[in-house]
Amino acid sequence: MAHIYPSLISAPPLKLQATITSLEPYCSGFHLDVMDFHFVQNLTWGPAVINAIRQATSHNIWVHLMVDDPQKYMSVLELTTRDILSVHLEAISSPEIIATIKNKGWRASVAINPETPLEALEPYFSLVDDILIMSVRPGFSGQSFIPHTLDKLKELKKIQDAEKYTFTISMDGGINLSNIATVINNGATNIALGSALFNGDPVKNIQKILGVL
Ligand code: DX5
Ligand code: ZN
């Protein structure tokens, strides 16, 4: 079963609570992009806002750290045991950080950029709860889905099936009404959706998207 996570970077910033409340009936949780102006050329929320959003919903939170020093951010986040924390492979130096995330009781996810080959993930396959395949270059919502990332998804699914790995597969970036079914049919279960929901009425948009799944 697929899980839809509205990406709140695209939501009106002064209406976060109302947005969360209106989308809760239709989604599994909320995706929070954390950017530091170093790892990517954009800046979003700090820990105070993230921890407040955590308190604002009974749904899961999926924090996507696009920062140079994920460890530092992790130490100030107050998540719960069903929440997901994605750290970028390009920002970490060794698999030890996975144990740190798991010791906090959170679901440990490793994200990879479109240019990073799957082979780089090998040391992580048996350790993580989730792998996030980025389908755009991280930094901004509203970009187009990069087609070769679909091949990467298919390849990862093959590896997962062959080796019986237990991680889930997530995808984030450029997913919309016309490609979401393909992404899900090829093995992604956690889907972040930004502009596809927030360009226009998010409730109508999410209802339409659920209608094609
Ligand atoms: C990109 C972010 C995505 C983004 C999704 O850096 O990680 O979560 O907000 O937005 P869309 O769906 O518009 O690509
Ligand atoms: Zn994201």
Image (cartoon, rainbow, N blue to C red):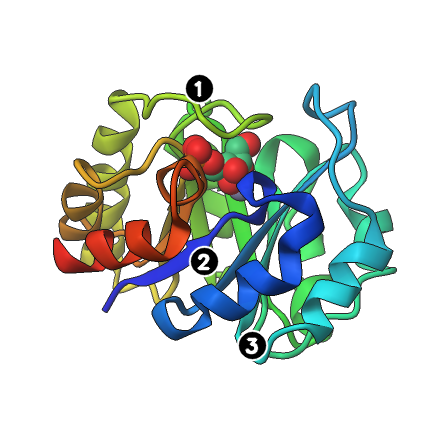
- Residue at disc 3, secondary structure: loop
Out of 140 and 157, give the one closest to the viewer: 140
Could you say which disc has been placed on residue 115 in the image? 1
* Crowding near the residue tagged with mark 3, few <14, some 14–19, many ≥20 C-alpha atoms within 10 Å: few
Image coordinates for residue 123, horizontal then vertical, percent? 51, 47
* Crowding near the residue tagged with mark 2, few <14, some 14–19, many ≥20 C-alpha atoms within 10 Å: many
Q: Amino acid at mark 3?
A: Arg
Of badges 1 and 3, the one in the foreground is 3
Image coordinates for residue 36, horizontal then vertical, percent? 78, 32
Q: Can you see residue 213?
A: no
Left/right placement of residue 9 relative to residue 195 reads: right
Residue at x 41% of width, y 36% of height: 199
Q: Amino acid at mark 2?
A: Asp
Q: Amino acid at mark 1?
A: Glu
Which quadrant, please, contains the N terminus? Answer: bottom left
Instruction: Report how far apart the C-alphas of labels 1 and 3 lie in the structure.
Output: 30 Å
Residue at x 56% of width, y 77% of height: 82
Which quadrant, please, contains the C terminus? Answer: bottom left
Left/right placement of residue 7 relative to residue 213 reads: right
Q: Earlier in the sequence, mark 1 or mark 3?
A: 3
- Residue at disc 1, secondary structure: loop
Q: Are marks 3 and 2 in contact (CB under 8 Å)?
A: no
Could you say which disc has been placed on residue 82 in the image? 3
Q: Can you see residue 168?
A: yes
Instruction: Report how far apart the C-alphas of labels 1 and 2 lie in the structure.
Output: 19 Å
The residue that disc 2 covers is 130
